[in-house]
Image (cartoon, grey):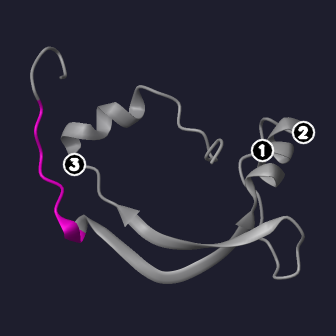
Amino acid sequence: MFHNQAQMDLWEPEYFHWVNGEIRVGTHAVIDTSLAADPAVEILGPCADNDAGTEVIQVRRICYVPPAYVHLLLVKPLPPVRRGR
């Protein structure tokens, strides 16, 4: 519901294009520690293959958000990291 009116949109499968790519990033514990040390930090990395506290994740280039849903992403803070598992 948005302004007491139902919103409906179709998310086509082609909106989610997985890239056959991987990137090395800090683990959630390393990111949490980095953010606690400097809450204003805007970027972490790049991470080298032998860096401690890192893991390899799959990445995709984009996830299409239909205009009808953009307001849902803008009304709440989106942290740069996923909290918990």
Q: Quadrant of the N terminus?
A: top left
Question: How far separated are the C-alphas under marks 1 and 3?
Answer: 30 Å
Do residues under tags 1 and 2 come within 8 Å of each other at their CB atoms?
Answer: yes
The image shows residue 76, relative to residue 27, as above or below, that is above
Q: Nearer the viewer, residue 41 or 56?
A: 56
Mark 3 surroundings: few (<14), some (14-19) or many (≥20) residues within 10 A: few
The span from disc 2 to disc 3 (Cα, nearest Å) is 36 Å
Q: Which residue is mark 2?
A: 37
Disc 2 marks a residue whose amino acid type is Ala
Disc 1 is placed on an element classified as loop
Q: Which mark is residue 41?
A: 1
Q: Secondary structure at mark 2?
A: helix
Q: Secondary structure at mark 3?
A: loop
- Closer-to-camera residue (68/10): 10
Q: Amino acid at mark 1?
A: Val
Q: Which residue is mark 3?
A: 66
- Tell me the magenta residue range: 7-14
Residue 18 picture quarter: bottom left
Q: Which mark is residue 59?
A: none
Q: Residues within 10 Å of mark 1 (few under 14, many from 20)?
A: few
Q: From the viewer's perspective, tell me whether residue 33 is left or right of residue 81.
A: right
Q: Are marks 2 and 3 in contact (CB under 8 Å)?
A: no
